[in-house]
Image (cartoon, rainbow, N blue to C red):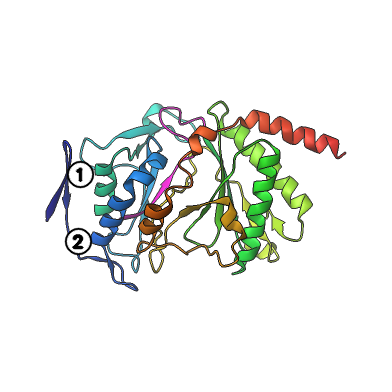
């Protein structure tokens, strides 16, 4: 066992040689090192955001699990927030979620083999009010060019509605297109806006895009998943490692990179992501400063639709 000290916070590091990614020989120690390297870029996207931790104590070759509540052995200095269940109920039914607000917590979670970090679209204490709207673009096959085209269509619509889009490879199969929001509207209103946006896109690109949830009904089209825009739902967070062979990383990119034909969803991984950040910085660094109004975007969408009828 070794010890990492972060100011007043002590993190005991254990079993650093445990293989978490047996295909590539990546150990828990290397996961911890990665999260320490990228913490300055990653933490602004984590702070005050309720988390769902995807943990793999025995590595990704074994079954992992999602964890929301902090375990009883988690140190008291790790911040948490109580989130009432979406179905309502008594205050006692609230679920305590971990918050990752500092480097010590990030290192501690990595030592718990929390490979992937997924977060709400809202931040404590205003957990009922989202600060992001997200489109999760899911391909029906391995044609990532179709995903890039879909992302460009979403970006164009967001620009037309006065929103400021940001794009991220997910480290899995697709892309996320995110618009930062002013914290003035609830989840129901934001999800309704996302649905209307998706419906408009599908109407304009019926052969390329779909909102059909059933995979066998998509007909090779890219699925515009907006269901994440709901209370209690989560998305993978920027710079999170994914529990997939090769340890790919969810990587924010510049909008111009959508035009690069060689762009793929797993171009960055635990071994090279930090070098990209050290060279180019975080493309999402100014995201919160460019938040816009969901209500204003909704009015712009309604006006656009009225002008076409």
Residue at image location 26% in from the left, 61% down from the top: 30
The residue that appears at 29% across and 58% down in the rendered structure is 31
SS at badge 1: loop
Quadrant where the N terminus sits is bottom left
| Dot label at residue 73 | 1
Between 73 and 278, the one lying in front of the other is 278
Quadrant in which residue 28 is drawn: bottom left
Which quadrant would the C terminus be assigned to in this image? top right
Magenta segment's dominant SS is loop
Asked which quadrant contains residue 119, the reply is top left
Closest to the observer, 293 or 53: 293
Q: Is residue 257 left or right of residue 10?
A: right
Left-right relation of 53 to 300 = left
Could you classify mark 2 by the number of other residues whose Cα lies within 10 Å: few (under 14), some (14-19), or many (20 or more)?
some
Q: Which mark is residue 266?
A: none
Position in image of residue 96 (x %, y %): 35, 36
| Callout in the foreground (1, 2) | 2
In the rendered view, tell whether residue 261 sits above or below residue 77.
below
The CA span between labels 1 and 2 is 19 Å
**Quick check: can you spot residue 214?**
no
Q: Estimate the x, y position of residue 299 in percent, counting from the top left.
A: 72, 30
Q: Residue at x 42, y 41 (%)?
A: 45
Q: Residue at 58% x, 28% y: name it.
A: 185
> Per the image, is 283 magenta?
no
- Secondary structure of the residue carrying numbered label 2: loop
- First to last magenta residue range: 113-130
Residue underneath mark 2: 16
Q: Position of residue 99 (x, y in %)?
A: 34, 38
Looking at the image, can residue 59 be seen?
Answer: yes
Tell which residue pokes out farthest to the right in this image.
309
Instruction: Count residues near mark 1 (Cα–Cα under 10 Å), then give few for <14, some for 14-19, many for 20+.
Output: few
Look at the numbered discs 1 and 2 and tell me whether their residues touch, using CB distance below 8 Å. no
């Amino acid at each position: 066992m070794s010890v990492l000290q972060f100011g007043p916070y002590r993190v005991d590091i254990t079993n650093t040689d445990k293989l978490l990614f047996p295909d590539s020989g990546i150990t828990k120690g290397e996961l911890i090192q990665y999260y320490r390297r990228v913490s300055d870029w990653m933490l602004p996207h984590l702070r005050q955001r309720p988390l769902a931790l995807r943990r793999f104590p025995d590595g990704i070759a074994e079954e992992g699990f999602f964890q929301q509540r902090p375990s009883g052995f988690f140190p008291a200095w790790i911040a948490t927030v109580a989130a009432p269940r979406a179905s309502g109920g008594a205050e006692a039914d609230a679920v305590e979620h971990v918050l990752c607000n500092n480097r010590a917590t990030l290192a501690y979670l990595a030592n718990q083999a929390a490979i992937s970090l997924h977060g709400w679209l809202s931040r404590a204490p205003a957990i009922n009010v989202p600060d992001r709207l997200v489109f999760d673009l899911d391909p029906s096959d391995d044609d990532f060019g179709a995903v890039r085209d879909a992302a460009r269509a979403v970006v164009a619509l967001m620009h037309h509605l006065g929103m400021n889009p940001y794009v991220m490879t997910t480290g899995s199969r697709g892309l996320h297109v995110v618009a930062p929001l002013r914290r003035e509207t609830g989840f129901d209103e934001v999800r309704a806006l996302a649905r209307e946006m998706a419906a408009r896109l599908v109407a304009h690109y019926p052969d390329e895009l779909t909102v059909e949830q059933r995979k066998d009904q998509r007909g090779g089209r890219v699925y515009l998943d907006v269901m994440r825009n709901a209370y209690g739902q989560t998305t993978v967070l920027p710079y999170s490692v994914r529990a997939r062979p090769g340890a790919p990383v969810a990587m924010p990119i510049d909008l111009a990179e959508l035009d690069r034909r060689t762009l793929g969803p797993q171009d960055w991984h635990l071994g090279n992501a930090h070098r990209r950040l050290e060279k180019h910085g975080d493309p999402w660094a100014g995201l919160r400063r460019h938040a816009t109004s969901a209500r204003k975007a909704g009015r712009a969408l309604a006006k656009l639709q009225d002008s076409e009828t």
